[in-house]
C-alpha cells in the first residue's frame, strides 16, 4: 500500500488522537482531565485488558457520534475499519482524518475531542501506555 505524505500525516494524526482517547479510558481520573469511558456516552467502549502497564479498549464510533473533551497518555491505535474522523486537539484547529482499515499508529499524550463525520462506523483498538510506577 503506497500513501502520499499528506495521507500518512492524516492517518498518523487520527491514530494518535484515537490512541489518546483509549489511553484516557485506561487511566484513572486522578491522572487525567476526564476519563474517555465517561466523556463519550454515545461512543461504545469496551475495556479488553487493564493492568498496571496498559489499558486496551475497543472503541466504536457510529456516524455522527462525538466523543467529548478527554485526555490520553501515550498510546497506540489500530483501525479495525475505515472511516472519517474529525479530531480537535486542545488549542488547535480541527483536523479531518481518513482512517484506513489495518493501520496502526503510535500517539503521544493529548487532550482532544473526536467526531465521526463519515457515513460508516469506525472501530478502533486503543492501547494506552500507563506511566511507570515509582
Image (cartoon, grey):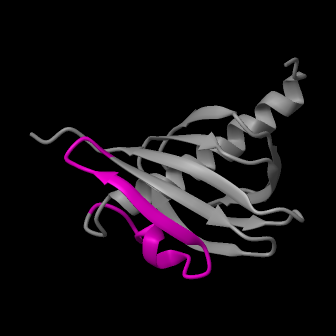
Q: Is residue 125 above or below residue 106?
A: below
Residue 131 as seen in the image, left or right of residue 64: left
Residue drawn at (61%, 33%), measured in percent from left and top? 105
Q: In this rendered view, identify the residue nearer to me: 105 or 45.
A: 45
- Whether residue 5 is situated above or below residue 114 in the rendered picture: above
Work out which residue is located at the far left of the displayed protein and give it: 134
User: Quarter of the image holding residue 10?
Assistant: top right
Residue extending farthest to the bottom is 41
Residue 15 seen by the camera: yes
Residue 99 x, y percent position in the rendering: 78, 44
Q: Residue at x 82, y 53 (%)?
A: 83
The residue under the point 79% across, 47% down is 82
Residue 89 in percent (x, y) is at 65, 57
- For the magenta stretch, what is the residue range? 31-54
Horizontal relation, residue 121 to residue 71: left or right: right
Q: Where residue 22 appears, x then y in whole percent? A: 48, 55
Picture coordinates of residue 79, whole percent (x, y): 66, 43
Q: Nearer the viewer, residue 46 or 99?
A: 46
Q: Which quarter of the figure is the N terminus placed in?
A: top right
Residue at (26, 42) in percent of width and height: 131
Question: Does the segment drawn in magenta span residue 4?
Answer: no
Q: Is residue 112 visible?
A: no
Residue 1 vertical position relative to residue 111 in the rendered view, above or below: above
Front-lying residue, 91 or 85: 85
Q: Where does the C terminus fall, quadrant-wise?
A: top left
Horizontal side, residue 109 vs residue 31: left or right: right
Amino acid at each position: 500500500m503506497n500513501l502520499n505524505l499528506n495521507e500518512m500525516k492524516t492517518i498518523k494524526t487520527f491514530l494518535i488522537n484515537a490512541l489518546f482517547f483509549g489511553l484516557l479510558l485506561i487511566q484513572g481520573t486522578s491522572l487525567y482531565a476526564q476519563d474517555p469511558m465517561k466523556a463519550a456516552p454515545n461512543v461504545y467502549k469496551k475495556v479488553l485488558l487493564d493492568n498496571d502497564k496498559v489499558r486496551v479498549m475497543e472503541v466504536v464510533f457510529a456516524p455522527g457520534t462525538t466523543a467529548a473533551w478527554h485526555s490520553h497518555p501515550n498510546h497506540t491505535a489500530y483501525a479495525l475499519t475505515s472511516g472519517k474522523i474529525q479530531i480537535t486537539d486542545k488549542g488547535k484547529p480541527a483536523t479531518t482524518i481518513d482512517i484506513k482499515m489495518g493501520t496502526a499508529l503510535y500517539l503521544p499524550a493529548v487532550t482532544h475531542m473526536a467526531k465521526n463525520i463519515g457515513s460508516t462506523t469506525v472501530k478502533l483498538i486503543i492501547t494506552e501506555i500507563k506511566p511507570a510506577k515509582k
